[in-house]
Image: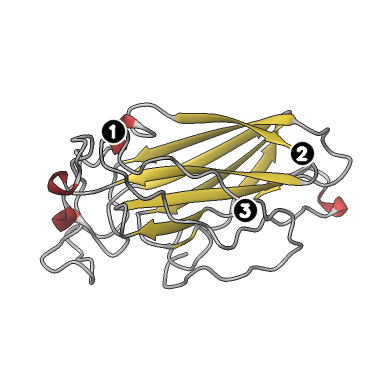
Amino acid sequence: MRGGGRLLPRGGAVACAVPLLACTSCFGSSTEPTPPPPAHSFLQATTPSAGLGTVLWSISAIDAVFGQDCFCTSYAIAIAAPSGVVRDNDVWTVTWTIKLTLVDKPSAPDPSTPGSGAAVDSGCDNHGTGTTSPAVHDVHVSGTGSSDQLVWHHPDAAADPTGYYHCDHTLQGPHGHQGLITVKVNHGVQTCVAHYDGTHTGKGDDPDQPGPPECTKS
């Protein structure tokens, strides 16, 4: 499913609206203060109905927010757990990966970046976080839900005082920097997976994105 779309409320019960933890610096350690990743003002996961049977808990679609000040995109999910399914402080394992791959047609331009054309940018690797190695987080869920996030830093080398990041904005396409973001959440016998294309603001279940999360039980 592909097309336009932005951060809009979705159907279903609001199961989680907790604040997300922000990173202390968008460019790793630096002598200059840098802004945190952009905040997620709306995050929702739909609590599964009792009739589903095979699904005990759920996650939201990935919510992506691009921040111009930090040259980064923050990807977030909410985890919804109906009352009685889990105990307070149960642990969910959340694994984020970024696959540097075309998500747009080759050479398709990013309308906001003159002279650009979609191509894989091997230097835009987030200093290895999520690319050369997965970002794995243990998330403690209390009450009915929690949340987690990954930040993809993607400045041009000239805009990065740390020297960590080496992206080329001329290689952007309609979805921004070319990459597939995947989050996998495991707890007990259940796994939920969601995807997102690129670095522009949107949600994973927008018409131009991969679609809603999928949950399975082993």
Q: Quadrant of residue 9?
A: bottom right
Between tags 2 and 3, which lies in front? 2
Q: Residues within 10 Å of mark 3 (few under 14, many from 20)?
A: many
Residues at discs 1 and 2 in contact (Cβ within 8 Å): no
Residue drawn where x is 74% and y is 64% of the image: 12
Between tags 1 and 3, which lies in front? 1
Q: Amino acid at mark 1?
A: His
Above or below residue 130? Residue 8 is below
- Pick whichever of labels 2 and 3 is earlier in the sequence: 3
Q: Which label belongs to residue 42?
A: none
In space, the residues marked 1 and 3 are separated at their CA atoms by 27 Å
Residues at discs 2 and 3 in contact (Cβ within 8 Å): no
Is 169 or 218 nearer to us in this picture?
Answer: 169
Residue drawn where x is 31% and y is 32% of the image: 29
Colour scheme employed for the rendering of this structure = secondary structure
Residues at discs 1 and 3 in contact (Cβ within 8 Å): no
Q: Secondary structure at mark 1?
A: helix
Q: Position of residue 174 (x, y in %)?
A: 28, 65
Is 191 or 154 nearer to us in this picture?
Answer: 154
Q: Which label belongs to residue 127?
A: 1
Q: Secondary structure at mark 3?
A: loop
Name the residue beneath numbered marker 3: 60
Residue drawn where x is 82% and y is 35% of the image: 86
Q: Which label belongs to residue 142?
A: 2
Q: Position of residue 168 (x, y in %)?
A: 16, 50
Q: Amino acid at mark 3?
A: Ser
In space, the residues marked 1 and 2 are separated at their CA atoms by 32 Å
Q: How many discs appear? A: 3
In space, the residues marked 2 and 3 are separated at their CA atoms by 17 Å
Q: Secondary structure at mark 2?
A: loop
